[in-house]
Structure formats: structure tokens, C-alpha cells
Image (spheres, helix red, strand yellow):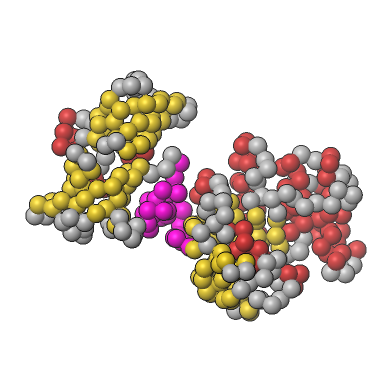
Amino acid sequence: MAAVDIKDLRKNYGKIEVIHGVDLAIAEGEFVSLIGASGCGKSTLLRMIAGLEPITGGRISLDGRVINDVAPKDRDIAMVFQNYALYPHLTVAENMGFSLRLRNVKKADIAPAVRQAAELLGLEPYLDRYPKELSGGQRQRVAMGRAIVRKPQVFLFDEPLSNLDAKLRVQMRSEIRGLQKRLGTTSIYVTHDQIEAMTMSDKIVVLNAGRIEQVGAPLEVYDRPANVFVASFIGSPSMNLFDGTIERSGADAVVRVGSLAVPLAPGSAAEDGTEVVLGIRPEHLRLAAEADAGAVLPMRVDLVEPTGAELQLSGEIASVPATVAFHGRPDVQEGEVIRLAADAASLHLFDKASGRRLN
């Protein structure tokens, strides 16, 4: 395993810059997920690390060794692709050992390496089969096995589970994370699935239009998004966001959202009159009690969606589309106006001009 250090990394296609001076440090043995909307540059960044995409500027280092101009096969990095990239005319064993054959490793040394990886992945019964005779999950294990036999310093994963059904994705993400922990290999994982990123990662990197918006532990990014983009992107359903203005009276402060006044927790640094964006996660809204009379948010319910584990409501608060997620099953009907409240400590406050977090 090895540390990966990226400094001021840039990528241009002609005159168009798609990666804008990215800085990222990944420690030995870390599992880091790159997440962002389609077209944000996460797969391009991964391919640049692998050497499959030339860089325009900046530096990529592996354990202190700059690898900008090192050929992909010499970078000691193994990549697992979305489409498995298996050779249909080769057996499972031959696919797994193919990279070692290219390195002119002796047959006597390839066989035990393949058997060891197959045992690790539960593929021993399938070594003589061809890819067409395997399920999607088994093919993905073969692709992982091909990477494992190389014993690389870094694993790269490019949305490896996107072709699998929902149940198999849950199983495979657990297997990949468990395998990474056993091997201890530094891993960089590209995904558009927030649940994958949250459950598998030591660290999440949120990308937007070729720039890093936030780097942090999964719950840190979820609980304290650095800006409005991260707040709106991380979380499903996404955070409710309302434009408002700070109103101060001594030490007390509220956010004025239309005709509503939402009290802030003591110690908020925002000045009187500051234009802000107020964020409230759907699960932090609750049915108001009598004690909440000064901070009630009326919501007209347009849609009631029972998901089993929770009840999701869609409607409007202060003429802004909003979502609520109840873990219980309150009796709420479409067309009803309900009274909601949120604890001041659960509110998120962002500067409207810059988008940066204020609390």
C-alpha cells in the first residue's frame, strides 16, 4: 500500500479545462470515494491517476515518487472497471492471471497467485468457467481478482457496482470494503451512489465541475456540509434550502423566511441583515408541539410516500418545495396543512453570496 498525493492537478481538452487545480492527499491504506454529479470529473481524475488520461498540469505522487510520465503498467496501480473488461475467450483463471502473463511471470508462480485470490473471493468453483457462464456479481469478483493477483500499491474502482441489481450491490459493497480492510491496500473509488460512498469510505471527496468542494469523513460531510452545493448534493432526500435574512435582537437571532421567523442557536455569528440560505434536513423536521409555538413551519402536503422504513412527505414551506422524512407513520393526508418544527441545533446556515457555511 502507498500514499497518493495530488497537487494542482489540471486537465484540458483543447481550450476547455475540466479539472481545475485539484489538491488531494490520500494516506496509506485509506478507502477514499470520489462522488459528484455526472460530468463533474471524477472518472477523469481516476483515469489520470491510473495513467490512462494524460495530465495537463500539476503532479501525481505515489509514496513520494512522481508518476506523471510513468506508463500505466509501471505505476503499480490496478483498476477495476464498470463493465468488468473480461476476455470472453479466456477462463476465469486465465482472466485473473492475464496481467501476470504480460509481466512474464512464470506459470508456476501464476497458478498459486490465482488460487489465493480465488479463495479470497469465493471463486474456486468457477476457475474453469468462461465469463458468459457467470452472474454479474461473479464477473465483478473476477475483475477484482485480476487486480488482486498483481498485489498493487493502489486499487482504483470506477463505478464497479452500477451494472448490478440493488440487492447484489448491497452485498458487493460489503464484500469490497471487507476485502480492502483485509488487504490494507490504498483504494480510490468512484461512485454516483451516496449510500456506497457513505458506508464504504474512510473519506469522501465531493467534486463539482472539476473542483473539490469538500473532503472529510462521511458523517462529517453529512452533518457539516461546507457549502450550499454539498448541502444540496449529499443526502437523500436532499436538504431543504430556504432563502432568508438574519434579524437580530440583542443576543437572539432569527432567520426571516417570508413571513416565518426561524430561531437560530445561540452564538450564531451572522450579522443583522445578512442574506443567507437556511438548510434543514428532511429527517430533522418533526410535527410541532405546543412548546414550539414560536417556531412553527406550516407545510401544505402535496404527496405522501410510504417507503416502509419511513414516511416521506412532499409539499411547500413558505412557497418553497420541501420534503419531510418521518421514521414513524403519522396519520397525514395529501392536501392537509401540517405544523412542523426543527431544533435550532440541527439548522444549517450558509452565506447566500458565497455559499459558504456560517455556523
In the displayed structure, does residue 250 sit left or right of residue 86? left
Q: Residue furthest left?
A: 250
Q: Residue farthest to the bottom?
A: 65
Image position of 282 (left or right of 178): left
288 vs 327, nearest the viewer: 288
In magenta segment, residue 221: yes
Residues 15 and 197: in front is 15
Write down the quadrant of residue 331 in the picture: top left
Question: Where residue 118 sits in the image (x, y, percent)?
Answer: 78, 51
Instruction: Reply above or below: 22 against 202.
Output: below
Q: Image check: 333 left or right of 291? A: right
Q: Name which residue lies at 84% across and 69% down.
A: 103
Q: Nearer the viewer, residue 335 or 120?
A: 335
Whether 340 is among the magenta residues is no
Magenta residues span: 212-236
Residue 290 visible somewhere in the drawing? yes
In the image, residue 180 lies at what x, y percent? Answer: 63, 56
State the quadrant of the C terminus: bottom left
Q: Residue furthest front?
A: 15
Quarter of the image with the N terminus in it:
bottom right
Number of numbered labels in the structure image: 0
Which quadrant of the figure has residue 17? bottom right
In percent of the image, x 41 and y 48: which residue is there?
232
Q: Residue at x 32, y 33 (%)?
A: 316
Give the camera-side residue of 197 and 120.
197
Residue at the image point whose x is 30% and y is 45% from the top: 242
**Which image quarter: residue 9?**
bottom right
Q: Give x and y (percent) for residue 249.
A: 9, 52
Residue 166 image offset from top left, x and y in percent: 61, 37
